Amino acid sequence: MIVRKPGVLIIADIEGSSGCWSYEASQYKTREWARACRDMSQDIDAVVKGLFEAGAEDITVKDFHRTGYNLLPELIDGRATIIHGYRRGPVPGIGDPRGASLLYMIGMHAASGSDGFLAHTLTSRIARLEVNGRLMSEAELFSSSVARYGLRPVFLSGCPVACRQAEDAIRGIQTCSIKKTGLQESFDSDAWRKRISSAAAEALGNISTEPYCPPGPFSATVIMRDGPADARKIAGTWGLDVRDDAINVHAVDMESLYRSLIRICYLTPAIEKFLPFGLSLYNIMGRAGMRWVRGTAAKY
């Protein structure tokens, strides 16, 4: 009997990586960001190597921070496929996840409204996101977005709060937390990469999870950081209920909820209409940033 080796989709973010220790390190074209991109790439390389050694194949890594151009492919095992930029669909941002059966989320952050490291959900414009009375993180949104394709979320790394939120929401998921205490210069990156590589490889045998598809309906309260005026403007644009700084969203399922949140965070009707063109421009910006990173990271 032929046993098919598992295909893996990795969603990679920067806030929970070993190189991001400040808000500046998550921002486009800062010296700190250049270093964080390099270290994030080395983290992903360690995970990819561990997964290949454990028997994975067809590993795809989706760069999912800001422009989607943060990972340096030349620092990552060449057997993995690196996808930069964002896709309109079929899964928002990710594109087509078919071919993978397992979802890994590396370098994640905690949900808006929590006390995790650089905590936010989708954008820092959201001060707090509650869905059916509890905070919701990107780990849940990403996991649910690929559920219809059968992907099981088996592993997440990030700050301790992000790991705890994932464990509370997604039954059976395995996590590996990174604690950013003290100075960045005293952090043992090599030891961290050995630990996350080993933990990721172990999770390849995780059979405890199912595709993450919690039943609806969902009632979300989106509290905008910039106050009532910003909330009213966004709510008016999309015909949503609003009270003070809180936008109220009602959705029948997670897919509808995710699309509503994307509209609130990133879009206007005009931008949505010309989204393919807008994504092309955003990708140009991302590629320019990556060229800048290559020239800057080498200096530090």
Image: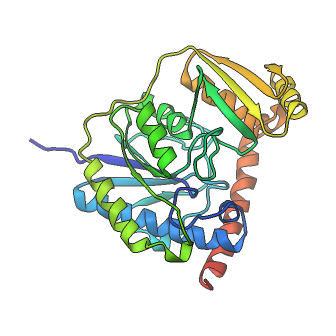
What residue lies at 72% left-to-right and 38% top-to-bottom? 127
Which picture quadrant has residue 299?
bottom right
Residue at 71% over, 61% down: 27
Q: Residue at x 53, y 15 (%)?
A: 216
**Of the pair 60 and 167, the residue shown nearer to us:** 167
Q: Which sits in the foreground, 297 or 173? A: 173
**Place of residue 73 in the rendered image (x, y in percent of width and height, measured from the top left):** 49, 68
Where residue 54 appears, as percent x and y from the top left, is 23, 57
Q: Position of residue 42 (x, y in %)?
A: 46, 69
Q: Position of residue 270 (x, y in %)?
A: 84, 35
User: Is 180 situated above or below 96?
Assistant: below
**Residue 148, image quadrant:** top left
Q: How is the image coloured?
A: rainbow
Question: Is residue 151 found left or right of 267 in the rendered image?
Answer: left
User: Measured along the vertical axis of the image, is residue 81 above or below residue 120?
Assistant: below
- Residue 297's place in the image compared with 241, above or below, is below
Q: Classify the position of the N terminus by image quarter.
A: top left
